[in-house]
Image (cartoon, coloured by chain):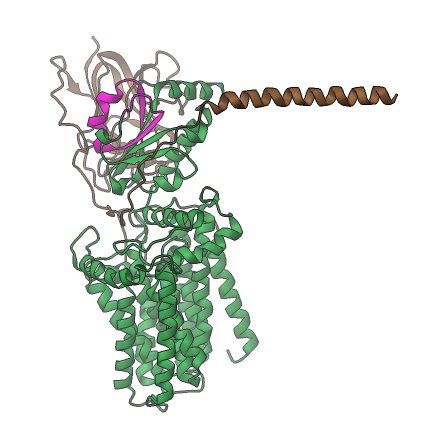
Chain colours: A brown, B green
Amino acid sequence: MIKKFFLFVFTFQCLILFVHGVGVNSQDTDKDKVVLKLELPKPMFVGTPRNIRSPNLEKITGKMRKPFYVPKGTKLLSLDKPVSASDMEPIIGEKEFVTDGEKSGEDGYYVEFGPGVQYVQIDLEDSFHLYTILVWHYHSQARVYRDVIVQVSDDPDFITGVKTVFNNDHDNSSGLGIGKDKEYIETNEGRLIDPRGVEARYIRLYSKGNTSNDINHYVEVEVYGILVK
Amino acid sequence: MNNKTVFRGVFLLVILGAFLFRLVLLDLRPMHHDEANQAVKFGNLLEKGEYHYDKNDHHGPSLYYLSLPIAWIFSGTKFASINEFTLRLIPVAFGVGLILLLLLLKGGLCREAVVFAGLFAAISPSMVFFSRFYIQEILFVFFILGAIASGWRYTRNRSPGWAAAAGFFAGMMFTTKETCIIAFGAILGALFLTWVFQKGSSRPIKPFSWTCIAHLLLGLGAAGVVSWLMYSSFFQNPKGPLDSVLAFGTYFGRAGEAGLHSHPWYYYLKMLTFSQYGTGPVWSESLILVLALVGSISAFSAKSKEDLSPLFIRFIFFYTLLATAVFSLIPYKTPWNLLPFYIGFILLAGNGASFIIKAGKNMFFRGAVVLVIGFGIFNLGMQSYRANFKFYADPRNPYVYAQTSTDFMNLVKRINDLALLHQDHKQMLIKVITNPDETWPLPWYLRSFGRVGYWQKVDAAGDLAEIPIIISSIDKMDDLRPLLQDNYQSEYFGLRPEVLLAVHIKRDLWDDFLQRQAVR
């Protein structure tokens, strides 16, 4: 019995030494490599930055948009056309502001919808070949609107025949699919979207907050096209 | 309010209210550029024991040294384990502490005035906002009030203890902010003007004696010792005390410059009287201003009583007048710089509220006054709630100044999420290529990451081909695009109003992130 006990203890100790030895070996291997210590530059301490409250209508980056060519006969279709929205009670303004032709960045010209994913929908009252969609979310401040998705359809409920003409939801956080279009900074030029002549009556524009706050704004949306014959 | 117990009970409620207002959701507002600067400076002191006074920026050492005990208690000695709540506990403590200091003004102000002043300090939107802000300002106001209160106690009994206390507080003012020179000037000017305008007082200022001069030297000694200890980093930086004097050259220059923070003379008074930005709400602390006016007038009409001293109130009036004038005439202005003179308005308003209530001969008048003041206090409380819990990072709040946007926290979350996926986790290499004023508060929020480098130019940042995450200013994008090509996914995040940062994520890491998102 005592022999068996010592045999057990001896075997157990051998096992521990073996495991330890393997560990040591692996550590020896690791010892060949060390973490490369990088001397990275430290941040520079600076005083209070400028406080900006005033409107900025200048472009932050890039140049003025180049001329955009459309077929002859292309007309503005969206002016004063009916607008509906996912948020039935805007925080500020009226949903009709979206198509009223006023593009000023000042207060009183934009409609403000609640936080999260929200959309506005324009009814062109007929089917058109669409050649340009121009969107101004809010251009009195440099900001980026998140998950800008523009879809068109002949179905007012956007169940059938939905075509996506712009999508910059790169992480699919709005759940309408991953978009490959780039995010952009709002300017007074608006964002020009090329629907490439797609045929539709309804235009739906989504967004999900922006880099300044989590709410959604529209100053104006313009849709240009030609009536489908 | 003749009953001592009632006074104590009401004052205790004021203290509790002030504490709660300051403490709740203390980490709600993203760290401001200046807070992050201070926090990283403090981190060096906490982890390495290193602090050297910088005569060009960041003010005096008191904030950092006074942060140490709270950090040790709540978060230990590792900078990465410190959080916003712990750091902001320091201004909270001093914001509440300054209300407690009002008790020392007994005899200068009557009990009712002390309670009202405490109440105004407890709920004033500006006082609450900057009592939740990890910068020097509220500490500075605490030390100013401490110096005034100790000085007042000294005039009552001429004890060396109060002389030393006044010196200690004056020393702490000096170790907190260079603008102490304005406060010292306003205090000395107010003392002189009070001496000139002491007519009508039944208790004129006693002439100085040799004992007083000895006490003055004692006070100066206390101020000198405190300043020397702090500025020399407790004997580690012998040059510090000299730099603390040389710093006045820097700050005099900055005060007169029409730089980033140049505002008109009426900036502070307008901010306190009436502010409205765009479609935002109206902000006004006019109740305090109007009552301060009443309190000031009463100082020149009231006679000395057992429980108040018109001379003391005149002193506060002159201090407030001089400090307000100097701070207003200096072109350099930021919202928090109003506090050192606004505390004077609050004391005068306390006196004004008490005076106007007592002035009423009949119950109807008194009741009406209490009702109006009560409504004003309620309104101030609501504004304070809005300023601190609703519009805490919204530029429509007048006290929000160059504040980090709430969207910045999405950037922080994104980087933390990506670090979970990257093989090196928090040792993942991050290159930050930003202009200096667009860098903060990144160093605070990236404090737990082991390998973060900061550059100001793209070509100085070395090879960018295999860097998992690059954070850049928008004006660096033109230089970055050809280097990053399609190998990176870029995202924009708001840093401050009008200021965006771009985060460029290595394509394989981004694809991994998208896959994980899809699985969820």
Quarter-of-image position of residue B168 = bottom left
User: Would residue B482 be counted in the magenta stretch?
Assistant: yes
Range drawn in magenta:
B463-491
Residue B65 in view of the camera: yes
Q: Residue furthest top?
A: A229
A33 sits to left or right of A170 = right
Q: Nearer the viewer, residue B73 or B94?
A: B73
A87 above or below B444?
above
Quarter-of-image position of residue B54 = bottom left
A205 above or below A70?
below
Query: Percent from the top left, x then y, of residue A204?
Result: 32, 22
Q: Residue at x 44, y 72 (%)?
A: B102
Q: Nearer the viewer, residue B218 or A170?
A: B218
Residue B365 in view of the camera: no
Q: Nearer the viewer, residue B83 or B386?
A: B83
Q: Residue at x 37, y 90 (%)?
A: B203
B389 above or below B368?
above
A8 sits to left or right of B133 = right
Query: Percent from the top left, x then y, of residue B482?
Result: 21, 21
Number of numbered callouts drawn: 0
User: Would residue B260 be counted in the magenta stretch?
Assistant: no
